[in-house]
Amino acid sequence: MSNLPVFEMFYSLQGEGKNVGMAAYFIRLAGCNVGCSFCDEKKAWQTSNSKQMSIESIIKEIKKTNAQNVIITGGEPTMYDLTELTKEIHDLGIKTFIETSGVNEITGYWDWITLSPKQNAFPLESSLIKADEIKVVIAKEEDFLFAERMKQRKTDLSATQKSNISFYLQPEYSQMHKILPSIVEYIQQNPNWRLSLQMHKMINVK
Ligand code: SF4
């Protein structure tokens, strides 16, 4: 079995998007080829900050918990082939979720794909097609234009595929109080969008 660079693993609650409040085991993989200025996980960019773990030992850790859902995040988790890991997780009867910017091909078996597109590295068309939800981080007024562009692209690509896509606007945490009133107003004017807040930060869990 192959190894993956694990920055951290922990059992917590999903704080963002449609599955907010759901108990989930998080696997944060190290390494990112995107490099957003507002990134709150910069420590996870370098694989030197991680521990190489076999899939067998990752599965062993998951099994110590009561988890029914596993969220694989980063860094940018699509830098790695996740076929084997997600298959093993599914074999336990546990659902798989991924959080990605979509800049690399998404490998593996997924029950839910969260795509958070970034302006400095646009997502692949194939990632947009597969996404179950689109979550755009808003730090300033101009970001609404990018959000609309991503929404339109997803809608065009998904015309004959997944329906029921959820589109979320999420304030960048450090700018939340400044930008939140604009996001609320924007959603009122454009009700296909929903608000996503980083609930885990507010309730002070990982
Ligand atoms: S893609 Fe995610 S992990 Fe990578 S720099 Fe951007 S916010 Fe950080």
Image (cartoon, helix red, strand yellow):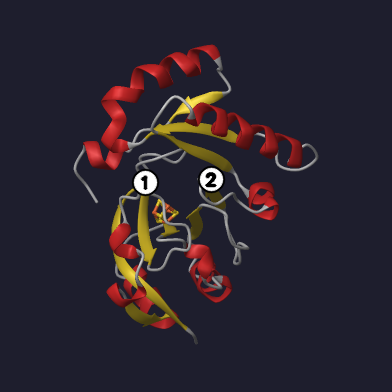
- Viewed as shown, does residue 163 lie left or right of 71? right
One can see residue 43 in this view: yes
**What residue is drawn where x is 41% and y is 68%?**
31
Q: Residue 141, which numbered label?
A: none
Vertical relation: 29 (above or below) 55: above
Q: Residue 117, which numbered label?
A: 2
Whether the residue under disc 1 has CB within 8 Å of ligand 1: no
Q: Considering only order in the chain, which callout, 2 or 1, is on the residue closer to the N terminus?
A: 1
Query: In this orientation, which residue lies closer to the viewer: 42 or 184?
Result: 42
Vertical relation: 69 (above or below) 149: below
Q: Position of residue 64 (x, y in %)?
A: 30, 70
Structural distance between the alpha carbons of marks 1 and 2: 19 Å
State the residue lying farthest toward the right: 160
* Secondary structure of residue under mark 1: loop
**What residue is drawn where x is 36% and y is 68%?**
62
Picture quadrant of ligand 1: bottom left
Total numbered circles: 2
Q: Quadrant of residue 158?
A: top right
Vertical relation: 89 (above or below) 13: below
* Secondary structure of residue under mark 2: loop
**What residue is drawn where x is 56% and y is 17%?**
190
Report the residue marked by disc 1.
14
Task: Tell me the mark number nearer the camera, choosing from 1 and 2.
Answer: 2
| Amino acid type, mark 1 | Gln
